[in-house]
Amino acid sequence: MNAHLRIANLVKRYGPTAALDGVSFEVEPGELKVLLGPSGSGKSTVLKCVAGLISPTSGRILLRGQDITDIPIHQRKIGLVMQGYSLFPHMSAYDNVAFPLRTPMHRCGQKELQKRVAQIFDLTGLTGLEGQRPSELSGGEQQRVALARALVFSPEVLLLDEPLAALDRELRERMQDEIRRIHTTLGMTIIYVTHDQAEAMKVADRIAILNRGQVAQVGSALELYESPSNEFVARFLGGANLLTGRVISILDGVIKVEVGKCELRAPSVDGLCQDALVTLLVRPERVRVAVPEADSNCLPGTIINSTYLGSALQTDVSLSDGTVWRSSMTPARSSFKAGVTTNIHWQIEDTHILPTQQSVNSLHLEA
Amino acid sequence: MVTVDKEEMASSGLFTKVAAAAVAALLISPIIVISVLSFSESRYLMFPPPGYSLRWYQNLIQDTSWRHAFLTSIEIAIPVMFLATLLGTAAAIALARSQSRAKELLITLTLTPMIVPSIVTAVAAFLWFAPVHLVETPIALVFSHTAIAIPLVVLSVSASLQGVDQSLELCARSLGASPFLAFRKITLPQIRAGILGGGLFAFITSFDEPVIALFIAGTKTVTLPKRMWDGIRYEIDPTVSAVSTIIVLFTLFLVVLAFHFSPRRTRTSPPASPETGGRQA
Ligand SMILES: Nc1ncnc2c1ncn2[C@@H]1O[C@H](COP(=O)(O)OP(=O)(O)OP(=O)(O)O)[C@@H](O)[C@H]1O
Ligand SMILES: [Mg+2]
């Protein structure tokens, strides 16, 4: 029971619809946990519940094992940067950042206040902008003021709701590094909400993927990408080539799966039995077009298009049942011609098995 | 507006100017006439005056009943200002935050005293205060004036609340501020102008309100408008016009002050110039 923050079975209903439908996860001390999910999946709602802006319909929030679900918002000692920063427009950057230290909750002496604000201005690279009003700051500067204001009272946990969504790509990447740097410097426990999977993978220690008010999977970027536990996660993080088939044999840690008239092999996983329906997942980077390899899976298909992207050659191949698979290879000198029939290949160990819910793809592949 | 071409501007400009001048003349001329009359040396209200003097102003200062009336009006207008500001501001905030489906209805209800003819309000106030023996007391006037002043405060404060992000208070609370502190530090400074403006309008409303005063003031609580009414009816000398002139100037001053505080003005002015609020090392 050493989780810093534990969210247990959180439910939030608005009328008949549930914004959160039983969300549970834990955040370790000093961990940067990313909440990742599509728009409307309930990410902001989780943060609002943790910060106390709204109260959940049911479920508990525990901070260091202590139930804070019913503690009023201003007594929670949780730093929050809301979607859109919410800076106080009538105050200078300095007064914005000093605000928490002037409330009875976090009050400190004048000297101490000055010292801490100066420190945080330094840490967030805002020194020199003290007198500016929010309307006189750039988007990136506003973002850092919001961050500084949430950090200055040394909160137990810091919550960031899409902190970089409004910034351009270059600035966003710089700020991602900066947030990581601040995180390592202060060793602070952070929940970071984003809908951008690349950003999630870059900043996170661990990621919790949210879908329709439920946690789809929790894990490191590597775990989620390499072994997603369901189709939603597989599709949400990067490209996903999927096929559904029936297990025909399990031998020496390798299973054979019958997909239509083809036979594909994959490393076995626990809990499979003969005749079970499984979904196979292959990442586009692992699929090669027209490069035969010994002892690999192979499927025939027709090239639909092939695009040179500089860092990759992206080729879409239509399989015999109409399913389109994508391959993303290191680019050769030339791309493929559309309409050409070919074979796609991939290594057995690059085939992942997802526990199947329902049969998504057809079973009618022709050999 | 900027894209209208010059010729059209010029022609419509001329017409607008003439029309505006005519309307202004119509509105302002009675005020000018009465101001001129106040400097008359004649004891009759005749225009143009046969000669000029300050005797009616002198008369005003010497006559204690006028001074009393002026003080009574102030004594009533000040509590009205505070009461109406307090209640009107609270109502405006409640209306802005209301999620109720009856919100539109509530807004209309709050603004009713402004829409209902003042003679109706006056009769109603009389019928309300008579059974409890409060007619002819300042209290009755204060309450009645507060009722008609509240809508002005509500309008003024609502206008300034429009520009305030409601989530800022929640944000302030997450940073450690209690609900009251969050309101005082975040919302209040942003709507201060609207509150001050509304308060001044409330003061003016009470200060120059004649109809309710006629019904309720009686002989004991004589406000300035009531005293002027009596003056016209029983004395008919230019002292009334001297008072009118002073009231016009006084009200004008308050209106200018109120507009100075009104939210629209503060929003268009820049928050702080980069030179004064600028970067400091
Ligand atoms: N006050 C509310 N009343 C009714 N429904 C709400 C309310 N707030 C949120 N919802 C609903 O709850 C769901 C989750 O909203 P939430 O703001 O948590 O999404 P999100 O994951 O943060 O999305 P985004 O990435 O767009 O910010 C949405 O379907 C939304 O419509
Ligand atoms: Mg959100």
Image: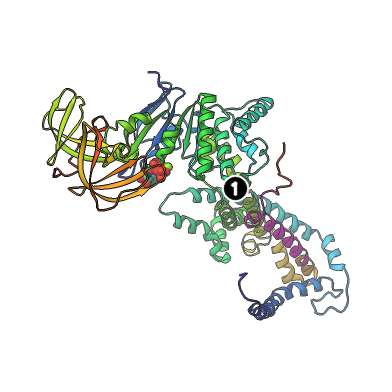
- Between B244 and A367, the residue placed more toward the observer is A367
Quadrant for residue B256, please give it.
bottom right
Quadrant for residue B129, please give it.
bottom right
Residue at which label 1 appears = B86
- Viewed as shown, does residue B39 lie left or right of A157? right
- Viewed as shown, does residue B94 lie left or right of A289? right
Residue A70's x, y, as percent? 42, 30
Residue at 30% from the left image edge and 36% from the top image edge: A286
- The majority secondary structure of the magenta stretch comes to helix
| Above/below status of B219 relative to A309 | below
Asked which secondary structure carries label 1, the reply is helix
Which quadrant is home to the C terminus of chain B? top right
Count of picture labels = 1
- In the image, residue B177 lies in the stretch drawn in magenta: no
Residue type (three-letter) at the residue carrying disc 1? Leu
**Residue B171 appears in the rendering:** yes
- In the image, residue B265 lies in the stretch drawn in magenta: yes
Which quadrant is home to the N terminus of chain B? bottom right
Q: Which residues are magenta?
A: B245-272
Residue B24's x, y, as percent? 70, 75
